[in-house]
Image (spheres, rainbow, N blue to C red):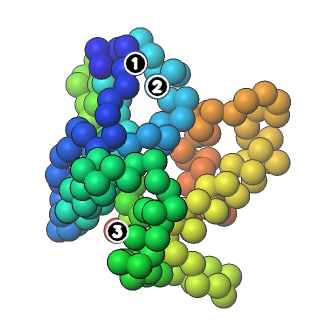
Amino acid sequence: MDGRRIELPALEGYETFALDGVNYEAFNTSGGLGTLAETLEGRAQYLDYKTIRYPGHRDIAKLLLQDFGLAGKRETMKDILQTAIPATDQDVVVVFVTASGLRAGKRTQVSFARKVYAQTWSGMPMTAIQITTASSVCAVTDLFIQGKLPQSGFLRQEQVALADFLSNRFGRAYEAAAT
């Protein structure tokens, strides 16, 4: 906030939005930013990472994790979720990014939104989370082998050019998902 890093509690920062006529909720979670906050420290006034879910998910998560005190009880949570919620192979991964700032002296906002659905890849049925996880790893590996990424040292996700990622044979999973 205001160009400095702060930690925010999980499940807070609640907001709602609609994308393609579907309502979603978003709230604070951890992990997705990786090193981006460090990279942009002092350059970005505001940066956050939130999980997107269907309405009601956060309230159920808060009930189980905070109200029932199951936050540190992984096996109990796993048992409850596997017993109470049917598994599905028809998931969707929503990627929604908005950035605003000055471009050529004009205040500008740019958004990137994609939905990736479960589908068959190379003859294998795959969930959306499998597709997005695998395609990201494979695209970055491909770009590394092609010499389009640093060949030594730690690689930050923000060092991967979006255009290179989306034009890669694996990164196209995100481009083809455009709605």
The extreme bottom residue here reads: 123
What's the distance in space between the residues labelled 3 and 1, CA to CA? 34 Å
In x, y percent, where is residue 126?
A: 57, 78
Return the mark for residue 5. 1
* x 41%, y 79%: residue: 83
Q: Position of residue 52 (x, y in %)?
A: 32, 55
> Is tag 2's residue or tag 1's residue first in the polypeptide sequence?
1
- The answer to whether marks 2 and 1 mark residues whose Cβ atoms lie closer than 8 Å is yes
Residues packed near mark 2 inside 10 Å, few (<14), some (14 to 19) or many (20 plus)? some
- Amino acid type at mark 2: Ala
The amino acid on which the numbered mark 1 sits, given as a three-letter code, is Arg
Camera-nearest label, 2 or 1 = 1
Q: Which residue is mark 2?
A: 37
The reply to whether residue 104 is in sight is no
Answer left or right for 2 relative to 175.
left
Mark 3–mark 2 CB contact (< 8 Å): no
Residue at 61% from the left image edge and 47% from the top image edge = 164
> Image point 31% across, 24% down: which residue?
46
